[in-house]
Amino acid sequence: MPPSVTFLKFKDTLASTRYRASIPEKHLLMNGFQNGNDIFICSKHGWPDELAKGYKRIVFDVCDDHFLTRHEPHYREWCKWADLITVNSKVMQEIVSRETGRDAILIPDPYEQPEKRPRVHEKLLWYGHATNLGDLERILPTLEGHEVEVVSNFPGMIQWTPENMRAAFTRAGLVIIPTGKSMAKSGNRAIEAIRRGLFPIANPLPAYNDLGIWTGDIREGVDWALSHKGEVMKRIFSIQEYVRNEYSPHRIGKMWEAALNSLGL
């Protein structure tokens, strides 16, 4: 019988809660696992250590690089205590190895949404946490003349809800994804855009390398996509097939199964 598991969850408006806890948990519970006190799967920061008491094994899921932020002590401590470390990107895996001397298991983020038919037109969409708004503000001056819809949790903007995101994706013709300083992020924002039938125009990020999307200058990518709509449509169809196979909740769930079973309970 598989071990029992408990995921530490935050609010569902956080992508990491959905991709790294809710979706994997759903798969595990459908495949013989139960909720219980064998394995505690925790992530992020801002929670008391006492939450981990009473479990036989601890899995620390590292999905952001905080080794040079004020949260560094928490991440070093839990990387030391954990029986197993999991990460969401190859770069994050390399960072954990460099900073802690420990190996981590790479489990990508799964896709979340139903697949929609491809389309491309002039309306641009950006979505993300308020902490990433600086990345958008940096490139907005280069997009003068283009309409950009923004969905975030920042006051005064269209607020992130499942309903608002569905509506924004429906209105959009391209998704723009400027990236910040961290190269350890997963590809989840691009993957979700692809699932929704949209072509992502992104700054370079290692997690995007396998997706076949535009990576480079955002304005240049937007101009190229709008002048090569037929090629963009072909690419979306091809990329959707790849994402359907490589990032399915079932495939990623099997990776979680293997990781947890390796703990020997």
Image (tube, rainbow, N blue to C red):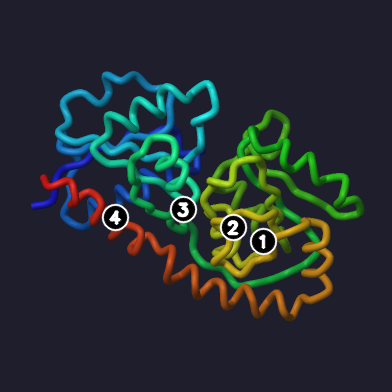
Question: Badges 3 and 1: C-beta atoms under 8 Å apart?
Answer: no
Q: Marks 1 and 4, Cα distance to the nearest angstrom?
A: 28 Å
In which quadrant of the rendered view does residue 205 lie? bottom right
Label 3 sits on a secondary structure element that is helix
In the shown orientation, is residue 142 left or right of residue 195? Answer: right
3 or 4: tag closer to the N-terminus: 4
3 or 2: tag closer to the N-terminus: 3
Dot 2 corresponds to which residue? 190
Dot 1 corresponds to which residue? 200
Label 2 sits on a secondary structure element that is helix
Q: Marks 2 and 1, Cα distance to the nearest angstrom?
A: 6 Å
**3 vs 1, front mark:** 3
Give the total number of marks visible in the rendering. 4
- What residue type is disc 1 on? Pro
Which residue is nearer to you in this view: 26 or 92? 92
Dot 4 corresponds to which residue? 27
Image spot of residue 96 (x, y percent): 42, 40
Question: Badges 1 and 4: C-beta atoms under 8 Å apart?
Answer: no
23 in relation to 76, above or below: below
Question: Badges 2 and 1: C-beta atoms under 8 Å apart?
Answer: yes
- Residue at the far right in the pictured view: 145
Q: Residue at x 74, y 43 (%)?
A: 136
User: Which numbered dot is residue 90?
Assistant: 3
